[in-house]
Image: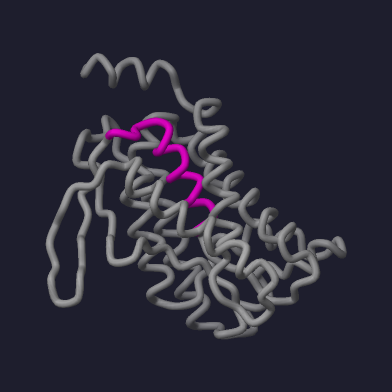
């Protein structure tokens, strides 16, 4: 699958697990559903092989030519391998529940899908003539991370820190963890914008996170946030 541009979600050797500063008031049904759908589609990829992957992945040149618009949606539920999907779903579970709780299930679902679409469009704008298939949920997850950044910047994220053979659980402020992740994406975006042989879609990450930062408050439920702030 080295011809496919995917979006590996990693912050060096830091793996976020959950928000250690607060608990959700409602079970994150939409986040769990999104993870289940991504898993089901991935197993379908394993069963059907490359033909299925190439059919439903997004090719920028095709979108520019007015073809295969459905792949703006389908591509964000596909992944290039086990590490790709596991990494993405770990990040989604780390940040998604709190944002679903701050919005509401329906608004959160719309936000997620729009974030993923905007991320894909950002990648297309960066490489409109590219024929490299794009896939992955990272753009949508980046939008969720952007929303988390502006909603709970001081929350501590329970994370696994892995340095060589040393592994420990640590707590990192969201603004530091997500901010550092974003700087990595931004730094690499220009270097890979015109790559035609595959790799990580950094521009999609940047576009998704910026979408989340700018629009998060439009999707938030003021009533839910007020209740949480009072600790009820």
Q: Is residue 80 above or below residue 17?
A: below
Q: Is residue 76 above or below residue 79?
A: above
Q: Is residue 181 left or right of residue 214?
A: left
Residue 150 part of the magenta-drawn span: yes
Task: Name the image quarter holding residue 149.
Answer: top left
What is the chief secondary structure element of the magenta stretch?
helix
Front residue of this view, candidates 125 and 81:
125
Front residue of this view, candidates 130 and 96:
130
Tell me residue 134's x, y (percent).
Answer: 63, 69
Q: Which residue is drawn at 56% across and 43% down?
A: 210
Q: In which quarter of the image is the N terminus?
A: bottom right
Q: Which residue is drawn at 52% across and 46% down?
A: 209
User: Which range is magenta?
Assistant: 138-154
Tell me residue 77's x, y (percent).
Answer: 53, 62
Q: In this view, does 123 lie to the left or right of 78?
A: right
Residue 123 part of the magenta-drawn span: no
């Amino acid at each position: 699958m080295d011809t496919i541009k995917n979006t590996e979600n990693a912050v060096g050797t830091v793996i976020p697990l959950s928000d250690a500063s607060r608990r959700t008031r409602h079970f994150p049904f939409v986040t769990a559903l999104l993870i289940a759908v991504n898993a089901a589609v991935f197993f379908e990829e394993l069963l059907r092989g490359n033909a299925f992957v190439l059919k439903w992945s997004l090719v920028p040149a095709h979108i520019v030519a007015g073809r295969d618009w459905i792949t703006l949606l389908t591509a964000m539920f596909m992944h290039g391998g086990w590490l790709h999907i596991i990494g993405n779903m770990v990040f989604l579970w780390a940040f998604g529940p709190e944002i679903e709780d701050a919005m509401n299930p329906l608004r959160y679902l719309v936000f997620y899908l729009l974030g993923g679409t905007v991320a894909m469009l950002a990648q297309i704008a960066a490489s409109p003539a590219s024929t490299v298939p794009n896939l992955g949920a990272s753009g949508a997850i980046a939008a969720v991370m952007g929303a988390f950044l502006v909603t709970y910047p001081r929350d501590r994220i329970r994370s696994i820190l892995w340095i060589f053979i040393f592994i420990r659980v640590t707590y990192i402020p969201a603004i530091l963890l997500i901010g550092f992740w974003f700087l990595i994406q931004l730094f690499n975006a220009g270097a890979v914008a015109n790559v035609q042989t595959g790799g990580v879609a950094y521009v999609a990450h940047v576009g998704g996170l910026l979408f989340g930062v700018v629009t998060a408050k439009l999707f938030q439920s003021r009533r839910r946030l007020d209740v949480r702030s009072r600790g009820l």
